[in-house]
Amino acid sequence: MASLDQFRGYTVLGMAFVNFLGGYLCMPQVIGHHHSYFSYADAIMPQFFFAVGFAFRLTLLKTIGRDGYGAAMRKGLVRCLGLLLVAFAVHGVSGGVKTWEELRGFTLPAFLEAAFKRDYFQTLTHIGVTSLWVLPVITRGPGQRLAWAVVSALAHVALSLWFNYQWTLTNPVAIDGGPLGFLTWTLPLLAGSFAYDWCSQPEGQGRPVARLLGWGVLLMLAAYALSCLNLRFAPNDGSRWLLEPPFLPPADPRSLNYWTMSQRAGSVTYLLFAAGFSMAVMGLFVVLCDRLHWRWSVLDTLGGNALVAYIILGMLEDPIRHYVPKDSPAWFALSAWGLQMGLCWLFLRKLEKNGVHIRV
């Protein structure tokens, strides 16, 4: 589907933009992660999950039709485990020891927390674990998938209010929700599976754009309403009922709790809003690509090898940024980012010309 390919390519481009430029003083604050509201940077990672959910349901349903349910589940399981192995090679683990005696002093829980709480649980790991979590329902009907999403979200709320929110933000601070983040990353992933259902119907049926935009707005409004619970809990005094709009920073940046839209905490408000936002963006791509037949070849190249792009962009980032200080003028920072993207595109274009598309 042209819209999915272009959506995925746009997401890779957006990821490169915010990862490289988000920390520069010359850039607007909204392109960086702040963990207190929904910035543009916070919109990017959930869109990968949305695209994964869309494609995961598509490929597994095709495999079921061709080879049967058992073969499809085995393929899905191998894919998830393979991605977790790739994630180990890309993200690595945290901490480390200098002596044998120090290693022997670790208990198993302490070792797991030190090694795996932070660095390993980044984008690829979260995609792998979340895909594994939804595997039992990704090919099922809408009712089962919706129930799975609701139960996952409620479980995350309960566990976070019990211990996980505080633990996630305690050193070593977790990334993107930490080991239990898969419960809420389920929301944009399963949202992508619903988008596949709507977009795969014969042309003229199903009204996919209306559904994507309508449900997207509904989910975003529901997430904002939940985020206003922030004002009813400490450290807030309950004197207000409405929080600032999701795209604006809070008036008091210290008034954070679980209901704050935070990618770091993997809060249900953040990922419910992100699921709706991803739906709305996908609706725009359906209009542009599937209805108006607009297509940009650069996005096809980036989206066609998204995993390779993710790895190459990460490898290029540090060598280039070594000589691009944080106080660089905008033209210099943007030029450095352009160099990163140009080099990445050359690698990907060569693979594309050779017909090489790397999948897990």
Image (spheres, rainbow, N blue to C red):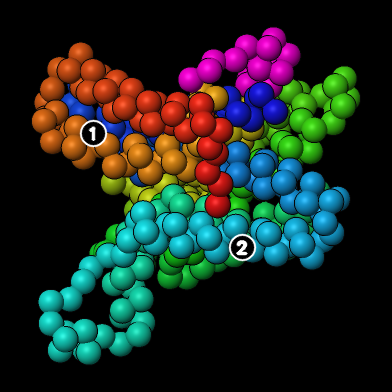
Q: Residue at x 66, y 17 (%)?
A: 289
Give the image location of residue 360, x and y in percent. Answer: 55, 52
The foreground one among 354 and 19 is: 354
Q: Is residue 225 visible?
A: no
Callouts 1 and 2 close, C-beta under 8 Å: no
The amino acid type, in three-letter code, at marker 2 is Val
Q: Residues within 10 Å of mark 2 (few under 14, many from 20)?
A: some
The structure residue drawn at horizontal position 13% and vertical position 22%, both measured from the top left corner, is: 328
> In the picture provided, is 114 more to the left or to the right than 234?
left
Residue under label 1: 23
Q: Which residues are magenta?
A: 283-298
Q: Judging from the image, what secondary structure is the residue with disc 2 in?
A: helix
Q: Please state if 61 lies on the left or on the right of 226 as rendered.
A: right
Relative to 332, is 53 above or below? below
Q: According to the image, label 2 marks what residue?
A: 78
Which secondary structure dominates the residues rendered in magenta?
helix
Q: Nearer the viewer, residue 245 or 293?
A: 293
- Say what amino acid the circle numbered 1 marks: Gly
Q: What is the crowding at mark 1: few (fewer than 14 residues within 10 Å), some, or many (at least 20)?
A: some
* Rendered location of residue 60, percent (x, y): 74, 51
* C-alpha separation, residue under disc 1 versus residue under disc 2: 37 Å
Q: In the rendered image, which quarter is residue 89 located in?
A: bottom left
Establish if 193 lies above or below 21: below
Q: Image point 64% across, 63% down: which residue?
A: 77
